[in-house]
């Protein structure tokens, strides 16, 4: 797994695997995260949206979730079980896209010219 991550994301030397046994039990009564829930979450990811700070395209994320929903469900379940939310998951990029200013001056001038022709 480490080799795959290093190949796909060069410069990511701080690769860590999750220990399969939780060390803290903040929410032991939480219901299990199911494969079906993970697949449902994957199905609503908008692949046309720009990737976040991790530069992973949404299409790739969706595909990974669809191919290994059991692995992702286990990670999500562990996060809930331990009451953790990785800080890297809280980071996002906000990109403001300027819209062109709308000016209807030309259209109003055209309408006024027609009205003038009809009434004067």
Image (cartoon, helix red, strand yellow):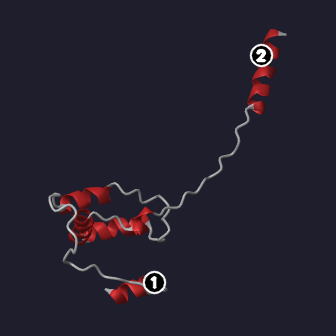
Residue lying furthest right: 120
Residue, disc 1:
12
| Rendering coords of residue 11 (x, y %) | 49, 86
- Residue pointed to by mark 2: 115
- Vertical position of residue 2 compared to residue 80: above or below: below
For marks 2 and 1 on the same chain, the one whose residue lies earlier in the sequence: 1
Residue located at (65% from left, 50% from top): 98
Of the pair 41 and 114, the residue shown nearer to us? 41
Q: Are marks 2 and 1 in contact (CB under 8 Å)?
A: no
Q: Quadrant of residue 101?
A: top right
Q: Give residue 43's position: percent from left, percent from top.
A: 31, 57
Count residues near mark 1 (Cα–Cα under 10 Å), then give few for <14, some for 14-19, many for 20+: few
Q: Residue at x 23, y 72 (%)?
A: 71
Task: Please name the residue shown 47% across and 71% down the image.
Answer: 54
User: Which secondary structure lies at badge 2?
Assistant: helix
- SS of the residue under disc 1: loop
Task: Please tell me which residue lies in front, 48 or 55.
Answer: 55
Q: In the rendered image, which quarter contains the N terminus?
A: bottom left
Q: Residues within 10 Å of mark 2 (few under 14, many from 20)?
A: few
From the top left corner, tell me how far across and down residue 62 is, in percent. Answer: 34, 65
Give the quarter of the figure containing the C terminus: top right
Q: Compared to 101, does 16 lie above or below?
A: below
| Above or below 32: residue 23 | below
Q: Nearer the viewer, mark 2 or mark 1?
A: 1
């Amino acid at each position: 797994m480490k080799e795959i991550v290093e190949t796909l994301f060069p410069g990511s030397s701080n690769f860590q695997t999750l220990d399969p046994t939780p060390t803290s039990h903040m929410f032991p009564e939480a219901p299990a995260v199911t494969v079906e829930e993970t697949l449902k979450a994957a199905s609503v990811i908008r692949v046309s949206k720009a990737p976040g700070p991790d530069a992973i395209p949404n299409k790739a994320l969706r595909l990974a979730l669809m191919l290994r929903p059991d692995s992702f469900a286990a990670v999500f379940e562990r996060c809930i079980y331990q009451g953790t939310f990785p800080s890297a998951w809280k980071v996002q990029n906000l990109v403001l896209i300027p819209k062109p200013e709308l000016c209807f001056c030309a259209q109003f001038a055209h309408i006024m010219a027609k009205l003038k022709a009809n009434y004067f």
